[in-house]
Image: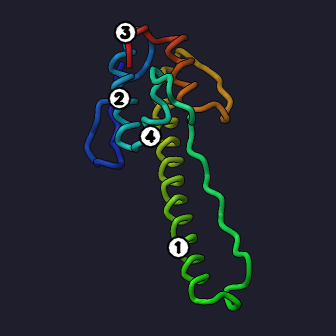
Amino acid sequence: MYDYVTNPITVYATEVPILDGPDDWEPWRVYIKSVALQNEVWKYIDPWDETITREKPVEPTRPVATKDFADMDQDEELAWEMELLEYNRLKRIYDEDFDGLSRVRLAILNTVSQNHPFYHRKSISVRRLIIKLQERIGSMLAW
């Protein structure tokens, strides 16, 4: 069973496989993996990589100044600005990874057949969701 959708990233019509049984597992797996790779989040969700320690990005801690900016000397101002730049860089990476995982989760939820309703907690990682689907519907083929 296939549906045709427009992928907003490429604006081309794409044939999207619907996971309805073990025979659909391989095309569905390839599709989900391609969405994850396109969003650069495969490092969080590869179900066969047992070395994965983080299944979702960790939000960076916003730095706190030890004193008012007006009271800082030139070296302290520079150090503070560098710390803020590094925080903003890490926050941007976190936001991109979080959004990428959300896109993969949405792709999964939109491509599992209505013949197989499944319920999951929103707190479950995308990786765990894929593993549960593989146990319930998929085949034992490697990712």
| Callout 3 amino acid | Asp
In the picture of the structure, the residue carrying the numbered disc 4 is: 41
Q: Earlier in the sequence, mark 1 or mark 3?
A: 3
The mark lying in front, picked from 1 and 3, is 1
Mark 3 highlights which residue?
23
Distance between mark 2 and mark 3 Cα atoms: 14 Å
Type of the residue with mark 4 = Val
Using a 10 Å C-alpha cutoff, classify the residue at mark 4 as few (fewer than 14 neighbours), some (14 to 19) or many (20 or more).
Answer: many
Q: Say which label, 1 or 4, has the lower sequence index.
A: 4
Mark sitting on residue 82: 1
As drawn, is 80 to the left or to the right of 6? right
Label 1 and label 3: CA atoms lie apart by: 53 Å
Q: Nearer the viewer, mark 3 or mark 4?
A: 4
Tag 2 secondary structure: helix
Q: Which of marks 1 and 4 is in front?
A: 1
Q: Mark 2 touching mark 3, by CB under 8 A?
A: no
Marks 2 and 4, how far apart at CA: 14 Å
Task: Identify the disc placed on residue 31.
Answer: 2
- Where is 86 relative to 138, above or below? below
Q: Which scheme is used to colour this image of the protein?
A: rainbow
State the image coordinates of residue 58 (x, y, percent, origin top left).
60, 47
Q: Distance between the residues labelled 3 and 4?
A: 26 Å
Q: Which residue is drawn at 67% across and 86% down?
A: 69
Instruction: Give the Cα distance between marks 1 and 2.
Output: 40 Å
Reply above or below: 39 against 127: below
Q: Quadrant of the N terminus?
A: top left
